[in-house]
Amino acid sequence: MAEEQPQPAAVQGIAAPQQVTYSMSPGLVRWLAQAGVSLALSSYQSGKFYLIGRNPRGGLLVDERLFQQAMGIAVAGRRIALATQGAIIEMVSSLSPDQRVNEIYDACFVPRRISPVGAVDAHDVGFDAEGRPVFVVTKWNCLATLSETHSFRPVWRPPFISRLVAEDRCHLNGMAMEAGAPAYVTACSRSDTVDGWRDRRADGGVIVEVASGEVVATGFSMPHSPRVHQGRLFVLNSGTGELMEVDRKTGAKTAICFCPGFVRGLSFHGGYAVVGLSRPRYKRFEGLALDGRLKAADSEAWTGAQIIDLSTGSVAEWFRIDGAVMEIYDAAFVPGVMCGMSLGLAAPELATFVTVEGE
């Protein structure tokens, strides 16, 4: 599988950048082949977007591209939306089934629409029924869609947020789509004061139903990545490192498994889920129940992704990143892609990778 090359040694007393290495479970490549999927991961801390697939020449192949503050990922066929520091970027692969790039990649996701939204701290993103991006505007405590004339057009905010203002009050972060519309969101608290959510990290988190505005479940520790799969509502309780199922009627919570890290990023394929894991590095992540869970398991937090068998709550396969990349924000399955690549905004290939519609 691909690994980054070692960095140059320290010069004149300046420490060299930390090397990044990848490792994986022995069965990951086989599992991806049998499932007919690849993986997409985003890391806002390192500004990287990963596509992880099966190299047709053998082993795993990791394609990484730079996208400043890469955050939420939405996948719809051969189309991917990526929330970044200042824009929502829509990428499309137009390769036909028999086409390959460099005789390896069966999908090449090229930025085709870049929508500047400004430094609004966009988090989760999804596609609505008309194929338009909908995204979480965390700094403004709302959901929004793109505007032809402005940075964004607000479409919803939690009832406990009194007005639309550029103050991250409740840390609205996650969004579950269902039937082409936002169905649920996660917030770290119901705070209605600037930065108030930080004082409620341990147990102030909530899941809110978008249609009714009602809080359907409480008591979470920095929840992220709500998702609806096969009619069931799932969420990552990041502060405890747990993948959970939430009863949509009663709000009752059932822990499915514990993952060794600050969990963010969730996607499903059949009876399996992929969960993103991070190593906490800021004070906002310290003092949470996750610390005790890791100590009790005699484990350290790690960065990467775990594929969970929902029927058993056990880890089926895993992919791990060690070194300077410490945080994953989102994780998604990319169905029907064996080995994909993308082109970053600064990639020189953007000038030469030319396709013609209808040809």
Image (cartoon, rainbow, N blue to C red):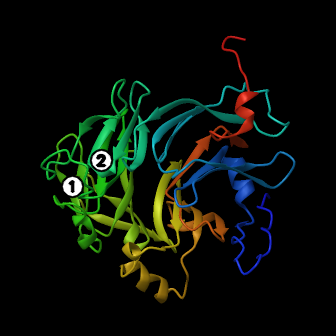
Please name whichever residue, 223 or 280, is drawn nearer the observer in this view of the structure: 280
Numbered circle sitting on residue 216: 1
State the image coordinates of residue 284 (x, y, percent, origin top left).
37, 73
Above/below status of 153 relative to 308: above
State the residue at coordinates (38%, 59%).
224
In the rendered structure, the answer to whether residue 301 lies left or right of residue 64 reads: left
Q: Using the image as rendered, state which of residue 88 and residue 228 is in the foreground.
A: 88
Total numbered badges shown on the rendered structure? 2
The residue under the point 44% across, 27% down is 131
**In this picture, residue 46 sits left or right of residue 158:** right
Q: Amino acid at mark 2?
A: Tyr
Q: Quadrant of residue 180?
A: top left
Residue at the image point whose x is 53% and y is 64% from the top:
327
Sequence-first tag of 1 and 2: 2
Q: Which residue is mark 2?
A: 184
- Give the quadrant of the N terminus: bottom right
Crowding at dot 2, Cα within 10 Å, few <14 / some 14-19 / many 20+, comes out as: many
| 317 to the left or right of 168 | right
> Do the numbered discs 1 and 2 sit on residues whose CB atoms are within 8 Å?
yes
Q: Position of residue 153 (x, y in %)?
A: 29, 32
Q: In the image as oriented, which residue stretches furthest toward the top?
A: 358
Query: Helix, strand, or loop for circle 2?
Result: strand
- Which element carries disc 1, helix, strand or loop? strand
Q: How far separated are the C-alphas under marks 1 and 2?
A: 9 Å
